[in-house]
Image: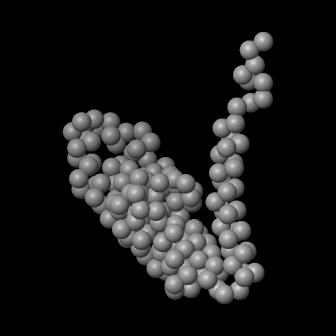
Amino acid sequence: MTLAVVASPIPSAPIALAAGAAYGHLWGTVQVVIGAELGALIAFGLARVLGHDVLRRVFGDRVDAGLLGSQTALTATVFASRLMPFVAFDMISYAAGLSRLQAWRFALATLAGIVPASVLLAHFGGEAVSGDPGRATWAVLGLGLVTGLPLLWVAMLRRPEEGAHDHD
């Protein structure tokens, strides 16, 4: 899980499902949370050490101005992004490392934000391999809803209004 967060192209959701399947609900969740938190902290640290000074040299003090300077706004942004399943987890970690967000705030917001998804994914993974076809079916349907509803909501928001393209 840690490697999946630090190395962008590796998806972490299947790893979380596999952790639930292999270790059960509780220990699968614990492993997922520890791995995701550790990966997020490594990505944050890499960006902080390697990138923030470069940004400051290019953009000057403007890097830390406005929204990028608000600890509360940055913390809330990290927390909210962790709750959204389709926001790139690793990119948020790297971007936060480039900001002036305090590391302890980043760690706390990340931890609070990843627990719900970790519990859900580990639970679905554990249910899928429970041996009970009914429980496995409900796990698959639940995962489909958790995944599909946000996609449907985004599609509805992006749908052009009826008649907006009429050229009468």
Q: From the viewer's perspective, is residue 147 above or below residue 166?
A: below
Question: Looking at the image, which is closer to me, 67 or 85?
Answer: 85
Quadrant showing the N terminus: bottom left
Quadrant showing the C terminus: top right
Judge whether residue 133 can be spotted in this image. Answer: yes
Asked which colour scheme the image uses, the reply is one colour
Q: Residue at x 74, y 14 (%)?
A: 167
Q: Residue at x 68, y 40 (%)?
A: 157
Q: Residue at x 27, y 48 (%)?
A: 52
60 left or right, relative to 136: left
Judge whether residue 102 can be spotted in this image. Answer: no
89 left or right, relative to 38: right
117 left or right, relative to 58: right
Residue 138 location, x and y as percent? 73, 74
The quarter of the displayed image where residue 133 is located: bottom right
Q: From the viewer's perspective, is residue 166 above or below residue 139?
A: above
Residue found farthest to the top: 168
Q: From the viewer's perspective, is residue 134 above or below residue 141?
A: below
Residue 71 location, x and y as percent? 43, 52
